[in-house]
Amino acid sequence: MLDYLQESYNGSQTNMLLNSAYYCYTLKDTKTGKFYSGSRGVEGSNKHDLLVKYFTSSTVVDFKENLKKFPERYEYRIEYFKSRSDAFSAEKVFHQTHQVGQNPSFINSLTSGGTNCGAGSVLCKDDKGNTYRVTVEAFATGKHLHVSKGMMNIRTGNGIKKIYVNEFDPATHTTEFKDHVLALDTATGKTCKIPKTTFNSDLRYVGITKGKVVAYDTVTNNRVTVSQDEFNNSNGRYVGNTFGLVSVIDKATGEKKLIEKENYNKVLYKHHNTGNVVVYSLVERKIVKISKDEYQVNSCNYANLTTKVFYKVDGRFFKSKNLLNDYYRASRGKSILHVDQFGISKKFNDIETLTREEHENGKN
């Protein structure tokens, strides 16, 4: 089979322009062996943005989703041109030469250059549901309705499907994001959308804000997200994002608000955490804020934030040696208090010791 990555658009391998990038590209899905061809114009940068900010203008939903989730599985060829029209003309020749709209080796659903060409345009629909395309500039006027307006993505056994919002039935349909989370892949450094079950069971994935802090930048006077190291070594530039403020509940209205600390009057306000505690949930595997009443009733399901080690026996988690000892004495007739916390699982092979980090990252 012909390798279309070797087929040239007769452009340049390096961009000679300083403040823009007009390019044609060919993508290859290394898993399926299929290709996708297109062109693109970037203003204000001399570098292409394929698989960085731009993930093609394809209307094939699963293809675009895979581009964003698994960019490492795609190989590509980039060729630069002096203008957007030059890039589009080269794309047109390439498409017509290889008939990409009908060629089974291509994911493209259309061949560029015909009346249905999608380059630089937006697919819209009228009030009768008829579809048509307009230029990006015309669409920006707000006079046209996007073809996907009023529609949503759902998950099916065959992948992602679009339906009208008013057709959605929670009893039979599953939303695109249900039971999925946005995570950071520590192996690639990229963010991805994965099933919660994968997130909870694979230590490769962590929350996208793990190791980051929401802070107040005293130089720019803005709220920013920075790494924990940046926050700790900022020499006072970054402070807590509510620096100088306190979160309260207005006793008269019940409204939660931020006020300046000097205006905190206990007659008018109560602290937003009054009656609440911040603890680690054994069930949810994360830090949560709950009422003191909830904690007192279900204290076995929560641990103090200083708790670093948990124990597991008979499928049950214990947050302290004392609680574990009570259970073990009742079920086995043995005490574990005389054994070091990290030596318990060696002394008693039916007890597993987990750090909180292991438990938080899904270890069972």
Image (spheres, helix red, strand yellow):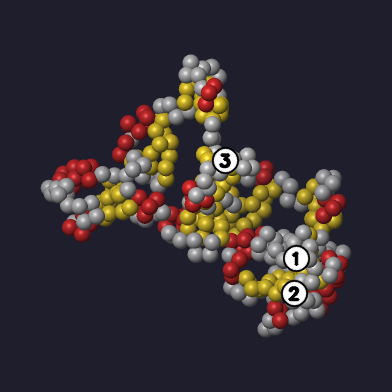
| Of residues 56 and 184, the one drawn nearer to the viewer in this rendering | 184
The mark found on residue 14 in the picture is 2
Is residue 223 left or right of 333 when viewed as pictured? right
Is residue 352 left or right of 295 when viewed as pictured? left
The mark found on residue 216 in the picture is 3
Q: Residue 94: which quarter of the image?
A: bottom right
The mark found on residue 46 in the picture is 1
Classify mark 3: helix, strand or loop. strand
Give percent across and percent down for residue 252. 53, 17
Which residue shows up at 56% across the image and 26% down it?
A: 259
Which residue shows up at 61% across the image and 63% down it?
A: 66
Residue 288 in view of the camera = yes
| Of residues 254 and 298, the one drawn nearer to the viewer in this rendering | 254
Give percent across and percent down for residue 40. 77, 65
- Is the residue 53 above or below the residue 9 in the image? above
Q: Amino acid at mark 1?
A: Asn
Q: Residues within 10 Å of mark 2 (few under 14, many from 20)?
A: few
